[in-house]
Amino acid sequence: MTDASPLTEGVGARLPRKEDDRLMRGRGQYVGDLRLPGLQDVAFVRSPLAHARIRAIQIPEAYRGQVFTAADLADVQPIRAVSGLAGFKVSEQPVLAKDKVRQVGELLAICLAPTRAEAEDIAAAVVLDLEELPAVHDMQAARAPGSALVHEHWGDNVFLETFVDVNFAAALDAPIRVSRTLSTGRQCMAPIEGRGTVVHLDHRLDQLVVHTASQMPHIVRNGLSECLGIEQGRLRIVSPDVGGGFGYKAILLAEDVCLAWLALRVGHPVRWLEDRREHLTANANCREHHYRITAYAERDGTLRGIDCEATVDSGAYSAYPFSACLEAAQVASILPGPYDFPSYRCRTWSVATNKCPILPYRGVARTGVCFAMELILDAVAAEAGLEPWVVREKNLVRADQMPFDNITAKHFDSGDYPEALRRALAAIDVEAVRARQRTPEPDGRRIGLGLSIYCEQAAHGTSVYSGWGIPMVPGHEQAGARLTPDGGLELRIGAHSHGQGLETTLAQVAHEILGVPVSRTRVVHGDTAMTPYSTGSWGSRVMVMAGGAVAAACRELADRALRIGAHLLQADTAACRFEAGRVVGPSGDIGLAQIAHTWYRRPQDLARDVDAGGLEVTAGYKPQRDSGTFSYAAHAAVVAVDPDLGAVEILDYVIVEDGGTLVNPLVVDGQIYGGLAQGIGTALYEEMRFDARGQPLASTFADYLLPGPAEVPEPRIDHMATPSPYTQFGVKGIGEGGAIAPPAALANAINDALRPLGATMLHAPVSQHRIVEAVLEARAATLARPREAA
Amino acid sequence: MKSARFAYERPGDLAALLARLAEAGDGVKLMAGGQSLGPMLNLRLAEPDRVLDITGVPELRRAAIEGDTLVLGACITHADIEDGRVPDITGGAMARVATAIAYRPVRNRGTIGGSLVHADPAADWVSALVALGAEVELASASGRRRLTLERFVTGALDVALAPGEMLVAVRISALSPGAAWGYAKHCSKIGEFAHAIGAVRIEPDAGRARVVIGAIERAPLLVPDPRDLFGGRIGRDFGERFDARAAEAVLRQAGMTDAVARHVHVTVLGRAVAQAAAPRPSTALPPSPTRTVSEAA
C-alpha cells in the first residue's frame, strides 16, 4: 500500500467497467444478434390451460414437416432435477408435453418457419383438443386432502417436507409470544433480455453449437447431454453477452432441449427468442412464499425462539439444476438470519401447483425469510413497546462471537453486524424521523421508518450442495491464465459475466498479482470450448471462486516468469523477486513483456531446465472453508404513505453493507443499486397473480409492473469491509443482497407509517390497492368499535 | 409476438385516405402514432388485412385557433402539445395534461386523435377533453359531422364512428375568464395507465361545472348534475363545498361496486377540485405517482 503507483488498478480500485464501453454503445453481442445463413425461427404451441389431458394435437396438412410434437421427440429424455434430500418426489418434465399439461405455457409443439411471424402463423393454426382438469392454483389448498393432483402417482402435491427442531420447547414460557401470517407474491425475474437460443451444426468439429443466454454454459451442456443422449464432446455451449440473468438464465429450459433436437433433425440453424409474453406467462416464476411465524421473546426484546411453518409454491416441475425444493428447504436453514437465539422450530413444504416451475431469483429464499423475520421482529417490538432497532440490537450476532456457528449450523465467517445497524441508524437519523412523525404532514401523508437486516451466504460449495444432492455440486473452481507473446494477459473462466463486471474485476485481481494493466487483460468466458468447467455464475460465488482461481493461476504464472526472468538477469532465482509486473534482481530488472517475448519468440535464450509448461497455467481453487462467505447489510428506509391512494414515496434509503474486501467498490455499488431496484419491485409493484383456473393474470408490462427510474431512489451507501478469513484477499460474495432487504425494510416503514391508523401490511408487494383496502378496513373497525365509557 | 401479415398504405391526402377507407371495409385499421395499435398488432389482438397510416395527410397535422376554438388535427402528438408547438387557449391546461401522459417516447409518437379513437378509459384525453367540453370532427367520403366527445366515446374502446368514417380534428373551446380547471390522476407508478382520473372545469360565476370521473372501465362519467357535488350550488366557494359522500353516491349509482376503487376515485376527484380552487396554479409536479395539474384561468 506504500507504493501506490503501479497497483492502482488492483484489488480495491474503483475502476469503471471495461465491458461498458461496448455495452453502452450498443455493441454488445447477444443471442438475438446472431445472423447465420439458413437460419429459421421457432415459435411454440403452448398450453392455454393450466391443467388438462391432451386428447389430440391436429396439425394442418399445409404445415406437415414444420410442426413437431412429443411423438417426434420420443428419444429425448425428460428433464429431471432430483434432490437427494430424503422424501423428495421426482417430477419428470417432458420437453414437449404428452398425456397431460401441467401449466399454462407448457410446450406442446415446435413450429418452424423462415421467420418468427410465419412460425406464429403456424402455431395459431395448430388445433388443440384438451380436456381441462381442475387446476391446483393455491399452495395452501394444494396440501388439503381431496385437492386435484399435479402428479397423480405421488398421491399428494408435496415435492418435499422438511422439519427442524432445535430445543424449541424451551421457548414456550417466554412472556411475549406474537404470531403473523406473511407472504410474498409470485414474481417474474424480468431481465431486459429474455431467454434465447440459436443452434447450428459445426460439421468440421462434429459439434452441435448451442448459443444460449446462460449463466452456466457448462451445466447446460450436462443437461443437454443427458436429455439428448449425446456425448458432451459433441456439444459446445456458447453464452455470448447476456442482458441480465438474476437466476432465470441458470436453468435448463425445455426450449433449449427442443432447439438442440431440432437442429439435429433439420440440419440447418434454428432460433428461438423468448418474447415478453412467453417470459411472463410461461417461463419465469419465482419468490412465492407463505409463512406462519411465531416469535417468543423476553420483555426487553431478547428473542427466546422462533417457530415457523413455511410453504413455497414450487410450480409444476422441478427445474434443472436447482430442483423444486431448494428454496423451501433453504428457508428452514436460513430463516434465523443474522440473529442469535436459543430455540427454533421450522417445518417447510415445497408444493407442486399448476404454475411455472419456481426458479431461484436474486437472493433466492433470503428475500422471503428476511421479510418474515424482519416483520416478526417489528411485531415483537410493538408488543414489547420498544423501538424496532432495540430488538435487533439485542439479538444480532456480535463481533466478539465471530466466527460464529448459528442455530442451524451456518458458519458466519466475520463481521460486526451491530455496527452496521448503528451506522444505519445514525445515517437515517432515527430521532429526526420520530420528530417529524409527531407533526402532521401538510399533504396528509404519513411518515414511516423501517429497518431490515440480513446476511447473505455466498460461494457456498461442495460441503453445502452435496447435502442438497441436486444435479449440480460445485467443487474446485478453475481459471486459465496465459501471457501473450507481447506481454498481455488472457484469463479464462467457466463462469459467466452478465452484469457482474467480471471482465474488469478479474483483471484487477490479476493485476494485483502480475501487474499487467487492466486494459491489456482479457477475460474469456461463456464458451465451453474455451473455458474450464464451472457450475457457473449463481449464488454470488464468482468473485470468491473464479477470483480465487485467477489469483492462483496468476501466482503460478508469476513464479514461472520469475524463474525465466532470473535466468535472463543471470541471477539466482532466490535472489530475485516478482514485483509489479517485473522480475527484480540484484543488479537489474526485466518486465513481463520481455519475459513473454523470450518464452514464445526467442526460446533459444531460455535455460535448459525451464519449466516446459511455459506461460500458460490452469489452476484450481477452493476457499479454506467452503461453507460460504457471509456478507450482510442493514437497510433503513423512510417513506411517505398516502393513506387514501396507497401511494408510497421512498424519501430516504440507507444501506450499510459489509461485503468483505471490495475488489471494485464501484462495481459493488452497481450491484447494490440494481438489487435495490429489484427489491423495490418485490416490495411495492411486482406480482404475477393467477386465477382459480391457473391462468396467469399479466401478460405484458402494462399489467406486470416493474419499478422505473422514478420509483427507485438513489440510496446512500456506506461500506464496511471486514475481510473473510477464508478467501483470497478476504473477498465475500455480494451480488444478491441489494434485492434481499428492501421488501422487509419498506413493509416495516409502511407499517410504521400506518400504525396510528391501525392498518398492517403483511403481504408483498404492498400494493396501493392493498394499502387503501387495509386503511378502509381499519377505519371501519374503528367506527364499529363500541365506545368505552368516558 | 409478431403481427400477422397485413397490407400497409400511407395515403398522401385526405380524399385518397377517405376513399381507401370507404372501399376497404371491415378489415382496415387506421394508424396514427401506433402507440396502442402497434402492441395490439404484435399481440395479435388486432389482425387487420390492411393498415392505413394516416400520418402522411397534411391536414391531420394542422393546428389552428378559429375564433374562440382551438382545432387540433388528429395527428397532433402529445409532445406537440406538451412542448407548445401548437397554439393554446386553455391557459396551459392542455399542455399539463399532455406532460403527464405515459412516457416521453410515447408522447413523441402518440396522437390526440389516436388516443380518442382508441378510447381506452384510462387514457388522459378521453377524460380531460370531456371536462373541457371538446368536440370531435369526423369525416368520411360522404361528408363531415361534429359530435361532442361524450357522445363520441360510447364505452371502453368503443366510439361512435360509422363505417368509412374517421376522426380528423378535435375542437376545444377557450376557458372563459374566471373558469377554473383541475386535473388529477392516480397511477400505480409514473407513466402507467391511470387507475383514477378526476377532471373539472368549473365556472363559479355562471354556477356551472363539467365534472368528469375517468378511468372507470367504461366511458368517462360526466357527472349529470355537478351541483350535487357541491351541496346544490356552484359558487366561488366550490372548493370548500365539495361533498365526497355525494361523489361516492354518484359512483355507487354508476355501478362501481369495489369500495376501494370508489374511495380512490373520490379522493382523486377531490384533489382535482382542490386544485381548481387553489388560488395559484401549481406548476411543480409532486414527486409521487399521482400527477396533478391545475389551472385557474
Image (cartoon, helix red, strand yellow):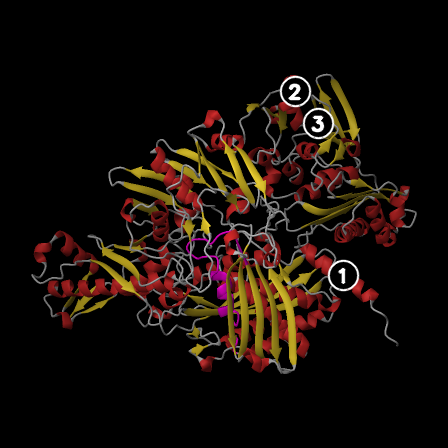
Measuring from the top left, give residue A61's x and y in whole percent.
47, 25
Residue A268 seen in render: no
Relative placement, left or right, of A484 versus A53 is: left
Amino acid type, residue under disc 2 in the picture: Gly
Q: Nearer the viewer, residue A112 or A527?
A: A112
Residue under label 1, please give it: A777
Q: Quadrant of the C terminus of chain A?
A: bottom right
Query: Residue at image x 75%, y 47%?
Result: B294
Query: Given the image, what chain letter belongs to the residue carrying mark 2?
Result: B
Amino acid type shown at disc 3: Leu
Q: Is the N terminus of chain A in the top left, top right, bottom left or bottom right quadrant?
A: bottom left
Q: Nearer the viewer, mark 3 or mark 1?
A: 1
Residue at the disc numbered 2 = B25
Q: Which residues are magenta?
A: A313-340
Percent coordinates x, y for residue A117 in the rendering: 49, 31
- Image position of A416 with respect to A267: above or below: below
Q: Secondary structure at mark 3?
A: strand
Q: CA distance from mark 3 to mark 1?
A: 46 Å
Q: Is residue B26 above or below residue A676?
A: above
* Residue A531 seen: yes
Q: Are marks 3 and 1 on the same chain?
A: no
- Residue for badge 3: B167
Closer to the N terminus: mark 2 or mark 3?
2
What amino acid type should be assigned to the residue bearing mark 1?
Glu
Residue at the spot x=7%, y=55% of the render?
Answer: A604
Q: Chain of mark 3?
A: B
Q: Nearer the viewer, mark 2 or mark 3?
A: 2
**Label 2, residues with CA under 10 Å away: few <14, some 14-19, many ≥20:** few
Q: Would you say A324 lies left or right of B191 here?
A: left
Instruction: Spot the residue most to the right.
Output: B232
